[in-house]
Image (tube, grey):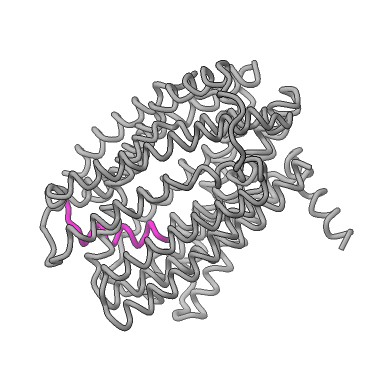
Amino acid sequence: MRLENSARNIKTAWMLQLVHILCQFFSRTAIIYTLSIEYVGLSGLFSNILTMLSLAELGIGEAIIFSLYGPIARGEIDTIQAIMSFYKKVYISIGIFVLCVGLSITPFIDNFIKEKPAIEEIYVIYMLYVVNTAVSYFFSYKAAFITANQKNSTVVINNGIFEVLMVICQVISLAVWKNYLLFMIIGITFALAQNISINIIANKKYSYLCEKVAIRIPNDILSQIKKNTGAMVFHKIGTIVVFATDNLIISKFIGLVTVGIYANYFTITGAVTTFISKFFNSIAASIGNLAVEEGTEVQEKVFFRVLFVNFALYNVACCCLFNLLNPFIKNIWLNERYVFSTFVVLLLILKVFIVGMRGSAQTFKNAKGLYWYNRYMPIYESLINLVASLILVKYMGISGVILGTIISSIFTFVWIEPYVLYKYGFNKKANKYFKKYGMYYLIFAICMLASFSINKMILIGGLIGFLIMILISTTVPIIIMWLSLKDTDEFRYFKNVITRKVVRK
């Protein structure tokens, strides 16, 4: 059942993520061509500011979801109702806090920008971003419950439908009126409709969520939530400082136009990484169930299979991104004014791969509720990242900001998260993991070098040349992985799974 739920959730999530990527692409293109790159920069900057405000969430959402796995598996309706009632109260409070604090800093927005753009409605745009962010907190707890029940496909289908409708309306509004305020108002309207819709679905599917709560949340579960939240506070701080300050630093020290260009790259890399992260989001509930019902030997075997998929997806994706990003932006999407150097792109892709490869260890660690044991890691990570980025940006520009994240990653979560998972989750040393992890990095380096070298030999331009580069960037890493990993247990397992699926059809 776990495998079936995960497979269904993954297929649905990936299909809808393709829709999301296309929506983001059309939306971003419409903004650039009807308005200017500065609006894209504002979008990236304001999103980062509001991500900083999301610190108010403190990681309590993840802690509450973890506390639901056991009661859901045991069918304890009263306990589920008590937890969800608590979840609702907490998230409504957080939404109000984000709304109030976010609006209160409106007069100081231009302090985050090196050169203020000629956009008169900049403060109103920011206020609409605040409202859009706060709205999500008022309804998201029902969607989280559906996901905890291994039914994430229901959530992503609902969100995908509303996103398509939203982008169609937004692009039409930009084409006709060229008004960014209307663009934002349409976004808020559809965000509300999307959240109301998923609440209706949750109430119909789990009618007991509408019933009056019979008991208070049990003390042991409340204590567990408090403990995990206490640990998640540090994780939240680290995540925000590391991943939500890039645009702030770039805007302050380099400029809003560079933020816009970086946002274009991030739109593509972010779409790909979000696409892959759907795999981990889709299996998170199943892994939580696995951690409750199976022993550590079975868990470790499944972990290595997840790690294999983690590597395979990011290896192919990063090879494609490194070889195709600049040709796509320069020759197909926009023009050479919006392109970074090859070195900047290399650093950006290396950052994507390093961060992406933490997915398997992080998913298992979170599913087993091991937040407490590496609670201080994000603080070290954020401090290293912030100091390194602020120093390097003065000497290396955009490269320094990206390199700051890479440095902080290597010195923290690359080794700390798997160490915690093995010591406290599997009760053994992580030697086997690090050996396999190192092998994957070596294969990645070979794939990057081989695909880049072969693509440099392609002298054909235009769309045909780009299609040839796609073929090379995809097939080269797959062939190298097959030659390198065909004798491993993980490769044989997935080969058998695929073979059985083909035979059935």
Decide whether the magenta segment is chiefly helix, strand or loop: helix
In the displayed structure, would residue 214 be above or below residue 27? above
In the displayed structure, would residue 131 be above or below residue 280? below
In the displayed structure, would residue 36 be above or below residue 55? below
For image coordinates 64% across by 54% down, the residue present is 153
- Quarter of the rendering occupied by the N terminus: top right
Q: Where, by quadrant of the figure, is residue 301 drawn?
A: top right
Q: What stretch is highlighted in magenta?
A: 253-267
Residue 254 location in percent, x, y? 17, 53
20 vs 351, left or right, is right
Residue 440 visible in rendering = yes
106 vs 169, left or right, is left
Q: Where, by quadrant of the figure, is residue 39 drawn?
A: bottom left
Residue 403 visible in rendering = no
Q: Where, by quadrant of the figure, is residue 208 drawn?
A: top right
92 vs 255, left or right, is right
For image coordinates 51% across by 34% down, the residue present is 62
Point out the residue furthest to the bottom here.
176
In the displayed structure, would residue 288 be above or below residue 280? above
Instruction: In this rendered view, identify the residue nearer to me: 303 or 457.
Output: 303
Q: Does the magenta stretch include residue 1?
A: no
Instruction: In this rendered view, identify the residue nearer to me: 226 or 365.
Output: 226
Instruction: In this rendered view, identify the residue nearer to me: 85 or 127.
Output: 85
Q: Is residue 261 magenta?
A: yes
For image coordinates 55% across by 66% down, the residue present is 161
- Quarter of the rendering occupied by the C terminus: bottom right
